[in-house]
Image (spheres, rainbow, N blue to C red):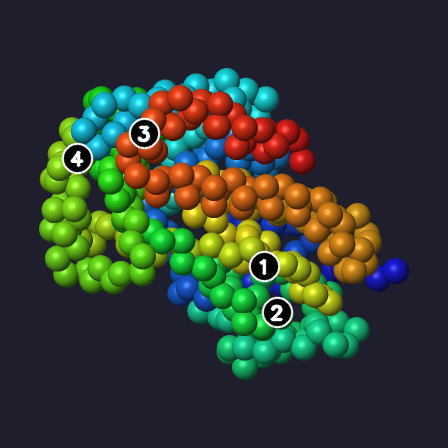
Amino acid sequence: MSKIERILIVGAGMAGLALAISLRRQGLNPDIVERQHGWSVPGAGIYLVGNAMRALGSLRLADEALQDGSVIRTQTILDDRGRQLAVIDTASVWAKCGPCVGIRRAELQKSLVNALGPADIQFSTTVSALDTYGAAAAVQFSNGTERMYDLVVGADGVRSSIRTLAFGGAQPRYCGQVSWRFLVQCPPSVSGWTLFAGHHGVFLFIPVGQGQAYCYADAAVAEPLDDPLEGRLERLRSRFASYATPVPEALAELRTSDQIHFGAIEDILQEPWGADKVLLIGDAAHATSPNMASGAAMAFEDALVLSKLIVSGQDVAKVTNEYTNQRIARIRWLHEQTRQRDRIRNLPPLVRNLMTRFLAKSAYRANYAPLVEEL
């Protein structure tokens, strides 16, 4: 049996950093490459549900997230005129895991980078070729170098190059939504996760600490649209002008379009995740739309499960099989629930709002029930 010792992590996002941290703490020193030129922060904020915080606890980073972010005890759903549809006690749902937390992405990334410590991350570097037919995986990098690895981990997001190289043409699916993300001063009326649901879009506030709120706005459109930087702020203000206070006021606070991150929402469920000496984790394997706010949670869980298996001393085939066995049911459940919730939000507003009034609390508990349980 050949132990896994030479490891390449492709991608230094949530999944890649969490895996590298866990492996280094257990005596392994993986190579890390990242396509970006340096530490970039895609998006503005992030909502960490209870199992994400439990995973951060395993990484010894939960206390830092609590210090930097804001504890979220409720989720309030309103219509676009501000009429309350439901209030969900999230604290009780996640009591076995830990609190839900809103935090700025930059703060969470800083914690992960600091926890990783000194590491020779190769930025502006991609994998240009991958040969897994020998005793080890031969990896050619975009800088012209080549190295051999026992395991190559694709943690490079929904547009994963490793997924393409190892599994061919699997492409992400457009989810029928485009989104805008930014930070504002937290309105006095917003004390927890607060969503305004309109006819063809939503506007969400999440407190993220230090007096700020993360705003996520989206629109349901059949085909992905482009929203060029020039004029983006004005168009966003116009799109949500009819929404209740404090939505227009939050948009009025913004000064330039540069403050707004825009993109289409995509998902993918790649099966299988492993082939020969390659394994996908995080969004590279199973990205979803954000309506269950579980992308980071799944990335952290993936990393913890995989690192434990790697250091167990099993060979790569057994690690890949056991990793899949431990993760697949949980991931399939999440995808099923997410797509079901996406379909519900696209119902006629009257029907959707009635369902929200009467079913939101029980549906929330049911959607997350398996994720509350330990890995």
Calculate the distance from the C-alpha at mark 1 to the C-alpha at mark 4. Answer: 38 Å
| Pointers 1 and 4 in contact (C-beta within 8 Å) | no
| Pointers 4 and 3 in contact (C-beta within 8 Å) | no
| Pointers 3 and 2 in contact (C-beta within 8 Å) | no
The quarter of the image holding the C terminus is top right
Q: Along the line of sight, which residue is nearer the eye, 56 or 156? A: 156
Q: Is residue 80 visible?
A: yes
**Label 1 crowding class (10 Å Cα cut-off): few <14, some 14-19, many 20+?**
some
Calculate the distance from the C-alpha at mark 2 to the C-alpha at mark 4. Answer: 44 Å
Calculate the distance from the C-alpha at mark 3 to the C-alpha at mark 2. Answer: 41 Å
Picture quadrant where residue 165 is located: bottom right
Q: Along the line of sight, which residue is nearer the eye, 161 or 88? A: 88
Residue 237, given in percent of the width and then of the height, sits at 13, 45
Q: Which residue is mark 1?
A: 270
Calculate the distance from the C-alpha at mark 3 to the C-alpha at mark 1. Answer: 33 Å
Element type at mark 2:
helix
| Pointers 2 and 1 in contact (C-beta within 8 Å) | yes
Element type at mark 4:
loop
The numbered dot on residue 31 is none
Residue 371, given in percent of the width and then of the height, sits at 59, 33
Tag 4 or tag 2, which sits nearer the N-term?
2
**Label 3 crowding class (10 Å Cα cut-off): few <14, some 14-19, many 20+?**
many
Tag 1 or tag 2, which sits nearer the N-term?
2
Residue 331, placed above or below residue 87: below
Q: Name the kind of residue labelled 1 in the image.
A: Gln
Q: Name the kind of residue labelled 2 in the image.
A: Phe
Query: Please, which residue is most extreme toward the bottom here?
Result: 144
Q: Which residue is mark 4?
A: 243
Tag 4 or tag 1, which sits nearer the N-term?
4
Q: Which residue is mark 2?
A: 167
